[in-house]
Image (cartoon, helix red, strand yellow):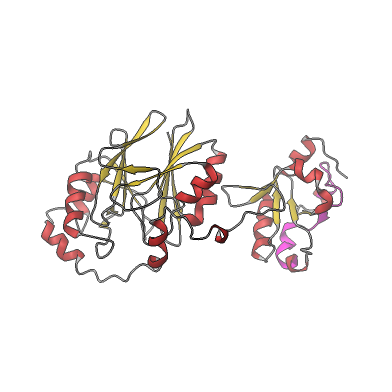
Amino acid sequence: MIFRQLFEAISSTYTYLLADEASGEAVLIDPVFETARRDQALLHELGLTLNVTLETHAHADHVTAAWLLRKRLGSRIAVSAQSGVQGAGQQLRDGDEIDFGPHRLSVRETPGHTDGCVTYVLDEGGMAFTGDALLIRGAGRTDFQMGDPGKLYRSVHDKIFSLPEHCLLYPAHDYSGRTVTTVKEERQFNPRLGGELSESDFVGYMNNLGLPHPKQLDVAVPANMRCGAPENESDLPADPAWAPLTYTYAGVWEVEPVWLEEHRQEVTVLDVREPDEFDGHLGHIPEAELLPLDQLAERAASLSQQRPIVTVCRAGGRSAQATLILQKAGVEQVANLSGGMIRWRGLGYPTN
């Protein structure tokens, strides 16, 4: 099985990719709108097909990418039937299962942080994805969105702490860089829920947290009640339209050599190798401009932006970094030549 724990830094949200390597069937748990392009790139690079996006609850600190991924990839959306979310293709209840290849995620309703919180348990209990019900050495707040500390205490003890003690627990958030815990650890060490702490202890603790509301609350909750669908689709950020570009998991826009060969006169080809490489055995693309990478940052402002820029180097590594430097300098239309001069020459395209 393929497993990836992905991170969105602004809201400290974890998105989880699980996939069957043989069939390529994949699921995403708690995708974030701002990182949808990253997740789509990873799916593409690993040769996976996204079957379904799953929500652990209606989040208050970020907008889900469920609707956007359905629009782009055709994946279905599954949410808790208790969440009140509209527009999902599947309403989940306790005991339901989501299959991908020979694997399955079982649904356990774990309300308390919100009414619609669920925990997803993989196969025979080796992993569980707890959303905000149980955090690493903590628990989700219970002071809004129909939160109930007593209900959350019972959810954690009955539905999560009842899993095998070796079960790996993956939360929806962590604000201290922690990534995973176990049932055994949280039973023993969780300062809110573990050890001999009673329900009344937990209720008293949670009722006196005094936390400020999440900054994106007024935007995130209404959007997430629509599966992340925008009120106006014209507000969506558009992908670059000047060429058929591919976005990589490394965060770089790339263009294929075949397109560049057909459109060389419509772009500026910027070669970021050293002069001896530019004139070396691989040669260079006709009409390419030479600007070594170590000089690029200080000279970026002087580059013409009348045409899109395609960066190139030996194999595509330095030129990928060049696109990031140029974007930081304010160049909007820029892409990396996939595979660099090695691939260009291998395809038999002209060089000087």
Question: Is 285 part of what is drawn in magenta?
Answer: yes
- Residue found 25% across the figure and 71% down from its top: 210
On screen, residue 61 versus residue 124, left or right, reads right
Note whether residue 160 is visible. Answer: yes
Residue 30 x/y as whole percent: 40, 50
Name the residue nearer the viewer: 162 or 65. Answer: 65
Task: Tell how many labels.
Answer: 0
On screen, residue 260 versus residue 21, left or right, reads right
Quadrant of the rendering where the N terminus is positioned: top left
Name the residue nearer the viewer: 231 or 305. Answer: 231
The residue range painted magenta reads 278-299
Residue 189 x/y as whole percent: 21, 53
- Residue found 79% across the figure and 38% down from its top: 345
Residue 154 x/y as whole percent: 16, 51
Work out whether 337 lies above or below 33: above
Work out whether 296 lies above or below 171: below
Name the residue nearer the viewer: 19 or 148. Answer: 148
Residue 48 x/y as whole percent: 51, 36
Question: Is 264 part of what is drawn in magenta?
Answer: no
- Residue found 27% across the figure and 64% down from its top: 144
- Residue found 72% across the figure and 53% down from its top: 242
Note whether residue 3 is visible. Answer: no
